[in-house]
Amino acid sequence: MLKQYHLETSAFDDPILLVDDKGEPILSSPPSATAGKLQYITSGEGWFAVETQEEINAISASITGGGEVWEENGQLCYSGRCPSDNHKWDSDKKKWLKLTGAEVQEKLTALLTEQRAAVREKINAKRDECVNGGAYVALIDKWVDSDEKGRATLVEIKADFDLNGKDGHYTLICADNTAQHIDFEQFKAVWDAVKTLKEQMFENAYMHKILLDQAENPEDYDWSIGWSTTYQQHLAEVNNG
């Protein structure tokens, strides 16, 4: 016995070595064809002896390949791996059946839905990366923070301008951690840059999702265009020359 297999938990385990009262292995005796060999037993109810590596492979393929392992007349039976993507296992008839045309289409639709959902997650992640990745403001020649904290700071400055008038000056900590003194016109340029960045990235993501829904193969759809450069990408480009 090479292994033992538990049907309910779908688990393999080492078999139990048969020993005497002194803990010495009990060897098989004549007329057994394997006289003088070690003897093994299973752990009991629910466990089945597995004699060869081929059986182990077939059972594993049945579990991972959409099939089934079952007991029949005290013997362990298994289906093997699914022959193709257009087959399904019939637990009642204990055999593989070819999918009908409607089932093939249903399976394809489900696959495309799953693939599109996965790509949408990537698009959303890229959108958020760009929205939160910083905005370049040409008027002050600085990158500013555009994440939630950065936007909250701009809201506070705007409230001060609204309350105290447009003649004041405020200090803005930029993405490079330097302090920039800004007047109202410079603040407006910062505000517009961050606002426009968010709007454009959401619009770009929306466009990609529309085109993704039209793509025959979602995994091949190229959604890499139209994204802004983040501050970290800018630094990498500068450092790389």
Image (cartoon, grey):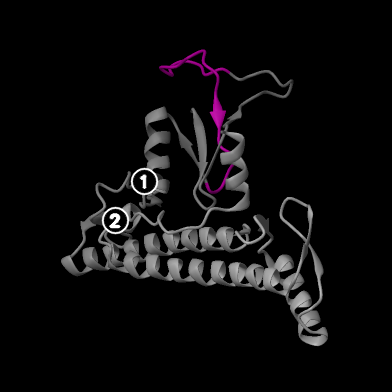
Q: Secondary structure at mark 1?
A: strand
- In the rendering, at what x and y percent does residue 222 appear? 35, 54
Quadrant of the rendered image containing residue 114: bottom left
- In whole angstroms, how far apart are the C-alphas of marks 1 and 2? 10 Å
The residue labelled by disc 1 is: 77
The residue labelled by disc 2 is: 94
Highlighted range, magenta: 27-46
The residue most toward the front is 167
The residue most toward the bottom is 163
Question: Does the image show residue 19?
Answer: yes
Q: Are marks 1 and 2 in contact (CB under 8 Å)?
A: yes
Which residue is at 83% across, 84% downward?
A: 164
**Amino acid at pointer 2:** Lys
Disc 1: CA contacts within 10 A as few (<14), some (14-19) or many (>=20)? some
Which residue is at 74% across, 57% downward?
A: 174
70 to 17, vertically: above or below: below
Q: Is 191 displayed left or right of 181 in the figure?
A: left
- In the rendering, at what x and y percent does residue 180 appear? 77, 59
Q: Secondary structure at mark 2?
A: loop
Disc 2: CA contacts within 10 A as few (<14), some (14-19) or many (>=20)? some
**Amino acid at pointer 1:** Cys
Q: Nearer the viewer, residue 233 or 205?
A: 233
